[in-house]
Amino acid sequence: MEKSEILTLLGLMRRSGHLAVGADDAAESCARGRARLLLLPDDAAGNTVRWMESAGQQKEVPILRPGFDKQALGEALGVGTCSAAAVCDTGFAIALSRKLEMEELTARLEEKLEREKRRKAKKLAGKGRAGSTKRGK
């Protein structure tokens, strides 16, 4: 897969608000349980790599090294350089894993997406209960 296609997809994620840019935001997204994938450029500093590995392990977030440097990642996202990023949408994470041709990761993310859909449907079904005590006018 071409790096330019991956970087274009990451830029789309950023514009849609589903990408946490920078090590601080990526770690916070992991801690809050929003991150689906962590991205680390090839030239990320050792401390950053250890920090992101620790954050990812706590919430079982996969870490990807897509094969570009901080400068290229930063340019695609509209910042100078970027040492880490977190994908915060399962659909975008699936699209990225497909572009990187990672079948096992794609399958895990698709299972997660199905669980999210079931959970959302159950939540929406619970709001329309007939025995609700809250009455509208």
Image (cartoon, grey):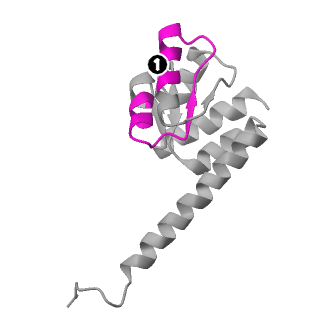
> In the image as oriented, which residue stretches furthest toward the left?
137
What percent of the width, then of the height, locates residue 102?
76, 37
Whether residue 30 appears in magenta in the rendering, the answer is yes
Q: Is residue 135 above or below residue 108?
A: below
What percent of the width, then of the height, locates residue 15?
49, 41
Q: Which amino acid does label 1 sit on?
A: Trp
Q: What stretch is highlighted in magenta?
A: 26-54
Q: Is residue 133 above or below residue 22?
A: below
Q: In this view, does 118 lie above or below 44?
A: below
In front of the other: 35 or 73: 35
Q: How crowded is mark 1: few (under 14 residues within 10 Å), some or many (20 or more)?
A: some
Q: Quadrant of residue 106?
A: top right
Which residue does the numbered mark 1 point to in the structure image? Answer: 51
In front of the other: 125 or 69: 125
- 109 displayed left or right of 88: right
- The C terminus - image quarter: bottom left
- 3 displayed left or right of 87: right
